[in-house]
Amino acid sequence: MSQLAKARLLALLAPAVLLGGALASQYVGGLYPCEMCYWQRWPHEAAIALALLAYGLSGQPRWSRALVLLAALAIAISGAIGVFHAGVEYGWWEGVTTCSRGPSAASSEDLLKAIMNAPLIRCDQPQWTLGGVSLAGFNAIFSFGAAIAIWALLAGKRRAR
C-alpha cells in the first residue's frame, strides 16, 4: 500500500472514529454535547467528505493528495477547537457565554415542557473525564495525532520521489 493510500485511509478512518465516538457518547452514553462540542464535530464531517473525494480521485494522485492534506487540516482544526474547549473546561480562559440544551420533543404542544425539562449543557463543565482528560481533550490529542500522522505519510511520499 502506498504512502498516499495509507494517508487517504487514515484521513477517512480517524475522523469517522472520532465522530462515531462523539455520537455514541451522546446517543448511547447520554452525554449531550454543548455548543463547543458541536463545533468540534463539523471539521470531522468536512474531513470525511474530503477523504471520500480523495478516494473518488485516487486515479489522480495530485488531486487526491491535495484533498487528503485538506482533510488533515480539517482534523487539526477540530483538534484546535478541542484545545480551546478543554482550556475552557480547565478554567484557563473564558469560553462562549451561551449554553445548549439536550434533545427536545418533536410535537409543538410539548415543546415548552421539553425545553424546560431538558438538561442544561455547560461548555465549561466536562460531563466525563478519564485521568483528568475530558472528551474535548481526547479529541484534541487524537485529532492532532491523526493530522500529524497523515502529514508525515505524505511528506515521506514526497521525499521518496
Image: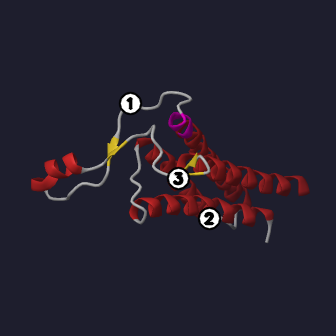
Of the image marks 1 and 2, the number of the one nearer the N terminus: 2
Q: Amino acid at mark 1?
A: Thr
Residue beneath the point at 73% across and 66% down? 5
- Give the residue at mark 1: 97
- Image: magenta residue range: 86-90
Q: Is residue 87 magenta?
A: yes
Q: Amino acid at mark 3?
A: Ala
- Report the Cα–Cα distance between label 3 and label 1: 26 Å
- Report the Cα–Cα distance between label 3 and label 2: 13 Å
Q: For the residues carrying marks 3 and 1, which lies nearer the camera in this image?
A: 1
Indicate how the structure is coloured in the image.
Answer: secondary structure
Packing grade of label 3 (10 A; few <14, some 14-19, many >=20) is some
Residue beneath the point at 39% across and 63% down? 27
Of the image marks 3 and 1, the number of the one nearer the N terminus: 3
Label 1 element class: loop
Q: Are marks 3 and 2 in contact (CB under 8 Å)?
A: no
Is residue 101 positioned above or below 124 on the image?
below
Is residue 27 positioned above or below 80 on the image?
below
Label 3 element class: helix
Numbered tag placed on residue 13 in the rendering: 2
